Image: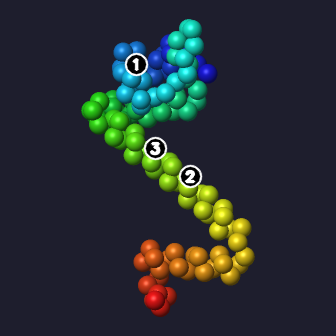
Amino acid sequence: MISEQQLIARMKRLKAEVLHHWIELGLIAPQRDASGFLFDELDEARVALVCDLHYGMGCEQESLPVIMRLVDQLHETRHSLRAITVAVSEQPDDVRVAITTRTRVVLGRNPAADKD
């Protein structure tokens, strides 16, 4: 965990008032103790991403919550897909082949196999 001052020192473009605004918007959710905000590695990576979006790509403050919600949804989807992949990989060969074949058909990657 690092302090707010340490985080701001690492993120050269970031100002304390901007960070506080992002926290108020819910873009960043650091822990807080008597000395102030504390940031873990995930918080730091998230701040770096928001900095890149805002300062590097010119995204307006108003669009950041929407963008970050989409990023969060994408991460959740990837996590779910990994879980499904593990579950499928644990199935017997015939089940795995059937799921893989049907998935390709549904995705349009093997339309000749569609016999429905």
Tag of residue 20: 1
* Residue shown at the point (46%, 17%) measured from the top left: 8
Secondary element at tag 3: helix
Whichever of callouts 2 and 3 sits on the residue coming sooner in the sequence is: 3
Tag of residue 72: 3
- Under mark 1, the amino acid is His
- Under mark 3, the amino acid is Asp
The crowding category of the residue bearing disc 1, from other C-alpha atoms within 10 Å (few below 14, some 14 to 19, many at least 20), is some
* Residue picked out by circle 2: 79
Residue 94 percent coordinates (x, y): 68, 82
Residue 114 versus residue 31 in the image, above or below: below
* Residue shown at the point (51%, 33%) measured from the top left: 45
In this orientation, which residue lies closer to the viewer: 41 or 90?
90
Whichever of callouts 1 and 2 sits on the residue coming sooner in the sequence is: 1
Residue 3 versus residue 106 in the image, above or below: above
* Residue shown at the point (47%, 91%) measured from the top left: 115
Residue 109 versus residue 4 in the image, above or below: below
Residue 21 visible from this viewpoint: yes
Mark 1–mark 2 distance (CA, rounded to whole Å) = 29 Å
Please indicate whether residue 60 sits to the left or right of residue 6 in the image.
Answer: left
Secondary element at tag 2: helix
Residue 34 percent coordinates (x, y): 57, 8
Residue 107 position by quadrant:
bottom left
- Under mark 2, the amino acid is His
Residue 23 versus residue 71 in the image, above or below: above
Residue 5 percent coordinates (x, y): 50, 13
Residue 101 position by quadrant:
bottom right
Q: How many marks?
A: 3
